[in-house]
Amino acid sequence: MFILAGCRREEKDRALVNEWLTHNCSVSGHSDLVRQVAARGAAIEPLFLEAFRKGPPQARQNSVIASVERDWSQIQVQLAEPEIYGLSPEEITEMKSVSLANEKRQALDRSHFNYRSAAIEALGITKGAAGREELLRISRDNSSRFRSIALLALARARK
């Protein structure tokens, strides 16, 4: 019975971490998520450390690529019949200048950055020793894209 309860707790923790990592800031409920992450603290910190170090899972990356490809196909439909969509010559030129490979690369980069940034932010909330050590390491790395986020997370952890 105890093992089963432990498995359920681990599932709930993973679900909470996943919700945090994929949460859209414009959606309500952020303060509730912050409270939940703070309440689980050290228990879920290793999951956030792993998320930062590994980045988003392949399934998430595949979803991003699929979304870009859907958008790309819609652009191609519009370009095939620009008069139906009321596209100006400037819009047509701009749409034709977009490369599918570049769009995928940019979308994956944004997704990767946002995912890892969310993990760093969470480390400032969990307030564990390993998370603090990672935040300090990142904040000292002047070349890190995540330096400012780590500094903010450290400031938050001090509160």
Image: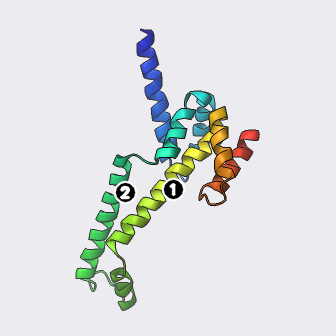
Residue pictured at 61% horizontal, 39% vertical: 34
Tell me: 2 left or right of 148: left
Q: Position of residue 17 (x, y in %)?
A: 50, 37
**Residue 91 visible in the displayed image:** yes
Q: Secondary structure at mark 2?
A: helix
Where, quadrant-wise, is the C terminus in this rendering? top right
Where, quadrant-wise, is the N terminus in this rendering? top left
Q: Position of residue 111 (x, y in %)?
A: 46, 56
The structure's colour scheme is: rainbow
Q: What residue is pinned by disc 1?
A: 113
Tell me: 128 left or right of 109: right
**Residue 28 visible in the displayed image:** no
Residue pictured at 52% horizontal, 42% vertical: 20
Q: Amino acid at mark 2?
A: Val
Q: Residue furthest top?
A: 1
Query: How crowded is the residue under tag 2: few (<14 C-alpha within 10 Å), some, or many (20+)?
Result: some
Q: Residue furthest bottom?
A: 89
Q: What residue is pinned by disc 2?
A: 64
- Within the image, what quadrant is residue 76 found in? bottom left
Q: Residue furthest right?
A: 159
Residue pictured at 38% horizontal, 49% vertical: 60
User: In the image shown, does 121 or 31 lie closer to the viewer?
Assistant: 121
Q: Secondary structure at mark 1?
A: helix
Residue 89 vertical placement versus 19 (above, below):
below
CA separation in Å, label 1 and label 2 = 13 Å
Query: Of tags 1 and 2, which is closer to the observer?
Result: 1
Residue pictured at 37% horizontal, 57% vertical: 64
Q: Amino acid at mark 1?
A: Phe
